[in-house]
Amino acid sequence: MNKKLNTILFILGATLFNVLIAVLSFIGLLVLYVKFLMPLIPEGGQSWGFTLIFISAIAISILVYRYLLKFLLTKVNVERYFDPLFVRKTVKKD
């Protein structure tokens, strides 16, 4: 496999991982909310819990993604296996 294919596969895999973490954290927070907090909150305020759960799930997925990406970047030589996404085009001066 070449560097471009490695880069594309890494981006696809990382995106799927991020979405999976968001979904799992949403389900986990939702179960905790329904089981423990929902009975304590009046009916008029229960819908706000779902909004907070959604935002929290996204925040958790971003934090987990950033932590694991930093860990991966310390273990893998990025320049050896991946191609840069954005390359500066040099302008020749005459």
Image (cartoon, grey):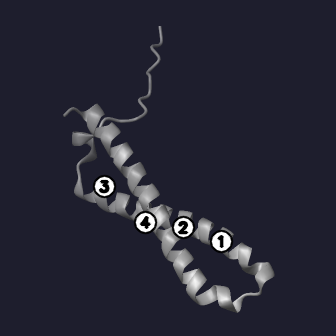
Rendered image: mark on residue 57 = 2
Vertical placement of 94 versus 87: above or below?
Answer: above
Q: Mark 3 near mark 4, Cβ–Cβ under 8 Å?
A: no
Q: Secondary structure at mark 2?
A: helix
**How many marks do you count on the picture?**
4
Estimate the spatial distance between the alpha carbons at disc 4 and disc 1, rounded to whole Å. Answer: 21 Å
Q: Earlier in the sequence, mark 3 or mark 2?
A: 2
Vertical placement of 27 versus 31: above or below?
Answer: above
Q: Residue furthest top?
A: 94
Q: Is residue 2 rendered to the left or right of residue 68? A: left
Estimate the spatial distance between the alpha carbons at disc 4 and disc 2, rounded to whole Å. Answer: 11 Å
Estimate the x, y position of residue 81 in percent, counting from the top left. Answer: 23, 41
Looking at the rendered structure, the kind of residue marked 2 is: Ala
Q: Secondary structure at mark 1?
A: helix
Q: Residue at x 29, y 58 (%)?
A: 72
Residue behind mark 3: 73
Q: Residues within 10 Å of mark 4 (few under 14, many from 20)?
A: some
Q: Earlier in the sequence, mark 1 or mark 2?
A: 1
Q: Secondary structure at mark 4?
A: helix
Estimate the spatial distance between the alpha carbons at disc 1 and disc 2, rounded to whole Å. Answer: 10 Å
The quadrant holding residue 34 is bottom right
Which of label 1 and label 2 is nearer to you?
A: 1
Rendered image: mark on residue 64 = 4
Which of label 3 and label 4 is nearer to you?
A: 4
Q: Residues within 10 Å of mark 1 (few under 14, many from 20)?
A: some
Which of label 3 and label 1 is nearer to you?
A: 1
Q: Is residue 8 rendered to the left or right of residue 26? A: left
